[in-house]
Image (spheres, coloured by chain):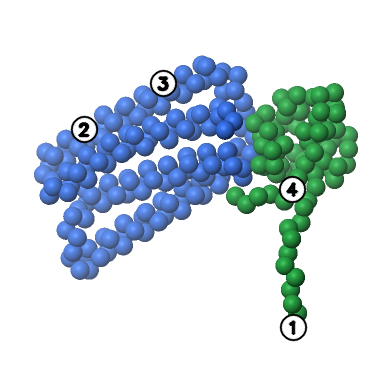
Amino acid sequence: MSELSFKEKSILGSLIVIVVISANYFYRVFSAVAQGPLDRGEMVALGSFGSSLLVALIILEIVYHAMIAGIFHAQANDPTDERDRLIAAKAGRNAGVILAIGCIWIVGHILLNVWFEENAWITPFVTAHLILLSMVAAQVAEYVSQLLYYRRGV
Amino acid sequence: MGKSHIRNRVKALRFHAEQMTQQELATRIGVTRQTLIAIEGDKYSPSLEVAFRIAREFDVPLEQVFQYAAPQSSSIDPT
């Protein structure tokens, strides 16, 4: 496998960071939800945990990208060309599809909950996190798509 | 991400042009070196504008740089 380009290194780093951070957060949230209804204190605690992870994500992104820009400074200044724009557009389209599927799935569950009064676990707190999970999944899909297009061609 | 049917002789033409480097050609035609590598490896078909720029750099017709290999189509029985 040939050496990764600067853009691929940048995307791969962002992908790893978002997967690790979000997996950590969603595991904590859905583990808590699985144990039963959450009280305000537990939700606030999860919110604080999420905020700290968000700060960690931002710091990790900044540090990683500053590091690779410093090491590979010549490539870091490469302009964005037509292939980069095409890959970004296609990957963005794929992300949109994932986000749409996630939202439709969530809306379906909410409607079923309303119509049949089942799935008592679909609380507003859980719904918000399912939407957030869809957004994260869409971002992951975008990163993976970009890497595949850069590696295998577009 | 289907395999492109467009082939090119960019690498060969570059070699015959006093062994022009990838970076030199990429800069002249307005793409990154990575994109030129993708073009030479048949992993990316450039836009028409970039294709014409490549042909102009080597001072050859477009058809001598890029070739289209039509896919084999199965014969259709009219009856």
Farthest top residue in view: A70
Instruction: Locate residue A65, reporting x and y percent.
Output: 46, 24
Amino acid type of the residue tagged 4 in the rendering: Ile
Amino acid type of the residue tagged 2 in the rendering: Ser
Which of B77 and A131 lies nearest the eye of the viewer? B77
Question: Is residue B59 in sight in this rendering?
Answer: yes
- Closest to the camera, between mark 2 and mark 3, is 3
- The number of numbered badges drawn on the structure is 4
Under circle 1, the secondary element is: loop
Q: Is residue A61 left or right of residue B45?
A: left
Give how far apart the Cα atoms at labels 4 and 1 are. Answer: 33 Å
Question: Is residue B53 in sight in this rendering?
Answer: no
Q: Is residue A47 left or right of residue B43?
A: left
Question: Residue A114, located in which quarter of the rendered image?
Answer: bottom left
Under circle 3, the secondary element is: helix
The answer to whether dots 1 and 3 both sit on one chain is no
Provide the letter of the chain coloured blue.
Answer: A
Question: Residue B27, located in which quarter of the rendered image?
Answer: top right
Instruction: Locate residue B47, reporting x and y percent.
Output: 72, 43
Residue designated by label 3: A63
Give how far apart the Cα atoms at labels 2 and 3 are. Answer: 23 Å
Provide the letter of the chain coloured green.
Answer: B
Residue designated by label 2: A48
Instruction: Locate residue B70, reporting x and y percent.
Output: 76, 56
Which of A119 and B3 lies nearest the eye of the viewer? B3
The answer to whether dots 4 and 2 both sit on one chain is no
Taking the spot 31% from the left edge, 39% from the top edge, the residue there is A23
